[in-house]
Image: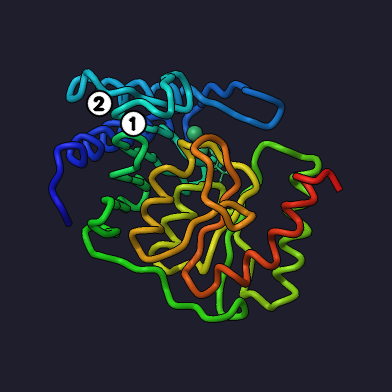
């Protein structure tokens, strides 16, 4: 792989967070609701606490943007973006598919991304200009040429109205091209990493927060994939739509997804 002080700290933070999460997994977990469908558990909060402690003790001058409590400006000189438990819904229902996602950026550019899936002890690590590594082995997106060769993943943000309906129409449109299937696995960071490792042809979601995508986006890009918003443009630095894929599928995915995403933008 590669060596970098921030990588060591990110991996230590993820390991510490994983031991917290595994203590809570499948136990009576104190679930609270951020909104009607948006869960947060004691595990999310404790996991973020140990990640923040680990980063702060190594880099006291760096800013941390965490999903649960840590706040920072997105344009901070050195910024850590942290999702202490990506896949909370899976976690709270006893499903093993969840991860910890940690990214580090310097002057607005993501330089490092670490996603860790504790239940399979899988590490997804990317360094800007240094490649993407799955358990230490360099990886690349798979060279799918057509939609009818690939599995595609999707996510639903916390919306049960227009965004959800537009997402369902986009899925229907993709099925019209005989994709192998749609997966809604519930952990955005892992959807991105699975696109990077070539298990998936692509992944899209109509809204996502920086802690969901910061590390995984770099992973896809370093694995040779393409990541844009759902109109084909660069993602904005805050909440954004996302379309990530292997290079040759991006145009076809965009053609099927963009018109439905634009019904939201134009209110159709
Ligand atoms: C969620 C997951 C999910 C995605 C949602 C995210 P959380 O993150 O990544 O797959 O569809 O948009 O908010 O709440 O489990 O950290
Ligand atoms: Ca998340
Ligand atoms: Ca989370």
Q: Quadrant of residue 65?
A: top left
Is residue 71 depicted above or below 39 in this figure? above
Are the residues at dot 1 and dot 2 in contact (C-beta closer than 8 Å)? Answer: yes
Left or right of 184? Residue 69 is: left
Q: Position of residue 46 (x, y in %)?
A: 39, 22
Taking depth in this image into account, of 235 and 159 the one nearest to the observer is 235
- The residue positioned 53% from the left and 41% from the top of the image is 236
- The residue positioned 51% from the left and 59% from the top of the image is 244
Left or right of 170? Residue 181 is: left
Q: Position of residue 52 (x, y in %)?
A: 31, 23
Precedes in sequence: disc 1 or disc 2: 2
Mark 1 residue crowding within 10 angstroms, few (<14) / some (14–19) / many (20+) = many
Mark 2 residue crowding within 10 angstroms, few (<14) / some (14–19) / many (20+) = many
Is residue 5 depicted above or below 187 in this figure? above
Q: Quadrant of residue 5?
A: top left
Residue 80 — which label? 1
- Looking at the image, can residue 226 be seen? yes
Taking depth in this image into account, of 62 and 36 the one nearest to the observer is 62
Label 1's element?
A: strand
- The residue positioned 53% from the left and 64% from the top of the image is 202
Q: Position of residue 86 (x, y in %)?
A: 47, 39
Is residue 250 depicted above or below 178 in this figure? above
- The residue positioned 80% from the left and 50% from the top of the image is 263
Residue 55 — which label? 2
Count of numbered circles in the view: 2
Q: CA distance from mark 1 to mark 2?
A: 8 Å
Which is closer to the viewer, label 1 or label 2? 1
Left or right of 5? Residue 225 is: right
């Amino acid at each position: 792989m590669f060596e970098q002080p921030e990588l060591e700290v990110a991996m230590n933070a993820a390991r510490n967070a994983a031991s917290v999460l595994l203590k809570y997994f499948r136990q009576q977990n104190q679930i609270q609701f951020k909104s009607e469908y948006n869960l947060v558990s004691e595990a999310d909060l404790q996991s973020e606490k140990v990640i923040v402690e680990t980063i702060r003790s190594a880099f006291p001058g760096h800013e941390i943007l965490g999903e649960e409590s840590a706040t920072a400006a997105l344009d901070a000189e050195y910024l850590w973006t942290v999702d202490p438990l990506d896949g909370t819904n899976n976690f709270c229902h006893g499903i093993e598919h969840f991860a910890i996602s940690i990214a580090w950026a310097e002057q607005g550019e993501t330089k490092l991304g670490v996603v860790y899936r504790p239940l399979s002890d899988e590490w997804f690590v990317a360094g800007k200009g240094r490649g993407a590594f799955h358990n230490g082995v360099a990886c690349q997106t798979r060279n799918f040429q057509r939609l009818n060769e690939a599995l595609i993943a999707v996510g639903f943000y916390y919306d049960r109205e227009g965004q959800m309906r537009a997402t369902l129409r986009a899925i229907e449109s993709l099925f019209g091209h005989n994709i192998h299937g749609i997966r809604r696995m519930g952990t955005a960071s892992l959807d991105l990493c699975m696109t990077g490792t070539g298990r998936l042809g692509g992944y899209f979601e109509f809204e996502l927060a920086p802690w969901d995508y910061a590390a995984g986006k770099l992973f896809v890009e370093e694995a040779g994939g393409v990541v844009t918003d759902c109109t084909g443009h660069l993602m904005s630095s805050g909440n954004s739509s996302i379309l990530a894929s292997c290079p040759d599928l991006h145009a076809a995915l965009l053609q099927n997804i963009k018109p439905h995403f634009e019904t939201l933008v134009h209110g159709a």
